Image (tube, helix red, strand yellow):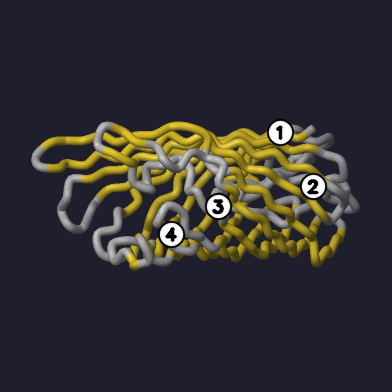
Amino acid sequence: MKKSYRLKVAPALLLFGAAGWTSDALSAPITFNTALPVAKDEFLAREQYVVNQSGDDPSGADKDRTARAAVSVLGYGVNGKLAVFGVLPYRDNELKVTVGGQRRTRAASGFGDLTVFGRYTVVQRDRPGRNFRVASFAGIKAPTGEDNKRDAFGRLPASVQVGSGSWDPLVGVVATYQTLKYQVDGQISYQAKNEANGFEAGDVARLDASLQYRLLPRKFTGGLPNFLYGVIEANLIHQGKDRVNGSADSNSGGTRLFLTPGIQYVTKRWIAEGAVQIPVSQDLNGTALKNDTIVRVSARFNF
C-alpha cells in the first residue's frame, strides 16, 4: 500500500460498554469509546450481547446475580466533528438468593433506560497513514425502562429492575492514536446517579485503555483486504456507595479493575468481535457482590 494512503474512519460508540468502529477496515475499542469521527450524514448501527455474572458474597450468603443485555446503538454524523448517538438495552436480570433455607429466584425482563449523547472532536491531527483525535462527549440516561416491577415476594430490588427511574447525566473525554498497524485509545468518564423511588445508585467514574493490533494480513498486497485484530483492554471502574432513603449502603460500591482480551474481524462495512472482561482486582465495600467474567459478543454496521 502506498505511504500516501490517508485513513478515513467512521466509528460508532456504545457508552460504558460501548465502542466504535471504522468504515474502511480499521479497528476500535470493544468496551468503551473512541475519538475517531463519524462521517457526515452516515448512520452507524451496532448490536451487542453482554452476559455479566456476579457472586462470591463475602458474608457467606448464597447469592448470585446474572444480568444479560442485548444493546442496540444507532449513531449519526452531523458533520465532520459532531456525532450523536442513542443506546437502548433490552435487559434480562435474575437474582438467586437463599432465604430461610429456601432458594428464591427473582427476575425481570424488558427494555431498559435510553441513553443519548453527543461527541465533539476538539483536537484533530492527520498525517499519511496515521491519525490523532481528542473528543469530548456529554449526554444523559433517561428513565425509559420500567422501575417498579414486582413478583410474589413484593417489589423487586433495584439490582433486578430493568430501569432506574432516574435521570443520570454523563461526561467524558477520549483520545485515539491510529496507524495502519495498530491503534491506542484512552478514555476518562463520569456519570452522576440521581435518586428515584428512595434509591440512589453510586456515581460511576471510569478510566479505560485499549490496544488493537493487526494480526492479519501481515503485509498489504493490493486492494483493501479484511483484517483480523487482536485486542487488549483495561477498565478501571469506581462506583460510590448506594443510598437507600438517604442513608449510605455500606455493602455497595467499590473499585474494580478488568483486563479484557478480545478479537475483531474487520471488513469495509461490518465488524464481528468478541471479548471477555476478567476481574483482576475487586476492592468492594462490605458484602457487595463480586463480578465473575463478563462476556461481550457484537456486530457493527455502517450505512
Q: Which residue is mark 1?
A: 301
Secondary structure beneath dot 2 equals loop
| Circle 1/circle 3 CB separation < 8 Å | no
Number of callouts in the render? 4
Q: Earlier in the sequence, mark 1 or mark 3?
A: 3
Q: Earlier in the sequence, mark 2 or mark 1?
A: 2
Calculate the distance from the C-alpha at mark 1 to the C-alpha at mark 4: 36 Å
Calculate the distance from the C-alpha at mark 3 to the C-alpha at mark 2: 19 Å
Q: Count residues near mark 2 (Cα–Cα under 10 Å), then give few for <14, some for 14-19, many for 20+.
A: many
Q: Is residue 70 left or right of residue 283?
A: right
Secondary structure beneath dot 4 equals strand
Q: Is residue 132 left or right of residue 106?
A: right
Q: Count residues near mark 4 (Cα–Cα under 10 Å), then give few for <14, some for 14-19, many for 20+.
A: many
In which quadrant is the N terminus drawn? Answer: top right
Q: Which residue is mark 2?
A: 38
Q: Is residue 261 left or right of residue 124?
A: left
- Regarding residue 268, the answer to whether it shows in the image is no
Q: Nearer the viewer, mark 1 or mark 4?
A: 4
Q: Quadrant of residue 25?
A: top right
Residue type highlighted by circle 2: Val
Calculate the distance from the C-alpha at mark 2 to the C-alpha at mark 1: 12 Å
Residue 9 x %, y % = 79, 47
Q: Residue at x 43, y 32 (%)?
A: 109
Q: Count residues near mark 1 (Cα–Cα under 10 Å), then give few for <14, some for 14-19, many for 20+.
A: many
Q: Count residues near mark 3 (Cα–Cα under 10 Å), then give few for <14, some for 14-19, many for 20+.
A: some
Q: Residue at x 36, y 61 (%)?
A: 245
Q: Which residue is mark 4?
A: 200
Residue 21 x %, y % = 70, 44
- Regarding residue 191, the answer to whether it shows in the image is yes
Residue type highlighted by circle 3: Phe
